[in-house]
Amino acid sequence: MSDHDFVSGSKPIGIERGEGPYLYSTDGTEYVDAGASFACTPLGHSHPAVVDAVQEQVGELTFVDSSFPVQSREDAYAAFVASTPDGLDQAWFCNSGTEANEAALKFARSATGESKIVAATRSFHGRTMGSLAATWKDAYKKPFEPLAGDVEFVPYGDAAELEAAVDDETAAVILEPIQGEGGINVPPAGYLETAREATDDVGAALVFDEVQTGMGRTGEMWACQNAGVTPDVLTTAKGLGNGLPVGAVAVRDWIADGAASHNATFSGGPVVSAAVHATVSTLVEEEWPAHAAEMGDYLTAELEAALGDEVREVRGDGLLVGIELKRGANRAARDLAMNHQVLALPAGRTVLRLLPPLVIEEADADRLVDALADTIAPEADAKS
Ligand SMILES: *Cc1c(COP(=O)(O)O)cnc(C)c1O
């Protein structure tokens, strides 16, 4: 997330067009996009299946409200629900990740009749008042308080603390299966299972925020499938429309049946629905999650070999990769862009985050590794 909300377009590279994992600047330079699109283009930039579907739909029917059945919405809904784990059989579309989490918390509170939300340290769930209340970082929250109340934070990854916090007054536990913004933090094995058991014991809703981890990035369509844990509510956005603004909430029947009224004007609009249908069906039919797993293993192994002791850790899953540096991540990201035409993202002060489109090949991974080795290793040498 940019901290400069009013200075969009402040970077010194004008982007003109995108294709696959590449972005091209106005002067014709090719950049490898390992972060500039914030995991929003799993199929790569301007993927023809999505472009065609959107172009056709926008010309035929740009918008009608969601109380009227429209084929593209029905197709999107069916493809999305089929892609989620068994048990999540109903869904609601919205416009963004924060809105999906906002809805998840409202659904959970109304379906359980309770209000307490248990969230994790270093979480990121979005910037609207409700999702922000469940987000960890004070710098994002303090100036806007009071936010929605009754949120208790527990240390991410600590199963005992989580269990202790969940009680009869708990409406929901909200967790990212792997934390993105907070530094690509992978919880210990068994952590998500504990969250499942603790919420089951008291009848609270388990909410997984898969806004960043979803859409095949971790080798399964949804990261919770790697752990074999199905939540009551799964939220997503970012890559769902391969670049179009759309989010979704998938829920179990008891949540759908118990949730009070909630909606949004643009929910499931025909154009974003066409994008969702094209994106989800292409990812599933062409088995891009498996490719992400393979490329993720390759990239991680090559990074470890090339960077070795020059970094503290390479972690993540699939093509959600965090590199814990021994120096500031902001400057490393800038050096990568300016000297090596590689666009990566910081995730906190010292973690560099790679979120390339799932369609990268070994040659692209090699480019990332070479650029990183060149950027990070010489600096460390000079200091030692
Ligand atoms: C980006 C992100 C959000 C917020 O999504 P927006 O579309 O920016 O509102 C929420 N949760 C996670 C895990 C994210 O990565």
Image: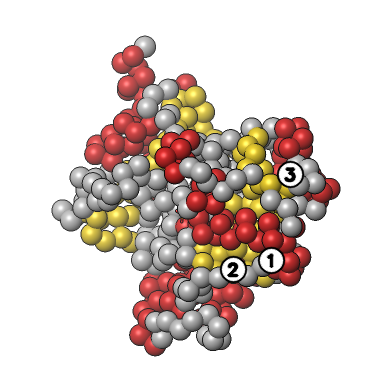
Looking at the image, which residue sits at the far right?
A: 201
Tell me if the residue at label 3 has its CB under 8 Å from ligand 1: no
Based on the displayed image, in which of its 4 quarters is residue 89 positioned?
bottom right
* Residue for point 56% across, 64% down: 248
The disc label shown at residue 262, or none:
2
Dot 2 alpha-carbon crowd within 10 angstroms: few under 14, some 14 to 19, many 20 or more: few
Looking at the image, residue 173 lies above or below residue 87: above
Q: Are marks 1 and 2 in contact (CB under 8 Å)?
A: yes
User: Of residues 350 and 100, which is closer to you in this image?
Assistant: 100
Dot 3 alpha-carbon crowd within 10 angstroms: few under 14, some 14 to 19, many 20 or more: many
Q: Secondary structure at mark 1?
A: loop
Q: Amino acid at mark 1?
A: Ala
* Residue for point 66% across, 67% down: 260
| 379 sits to left or right of 268 | left
Looking at the image, residue 189 lies above or below residue 326: below
Q: Amino acid at mark 3?
A: Ala
The disc label shown at residue 195, or none:
3
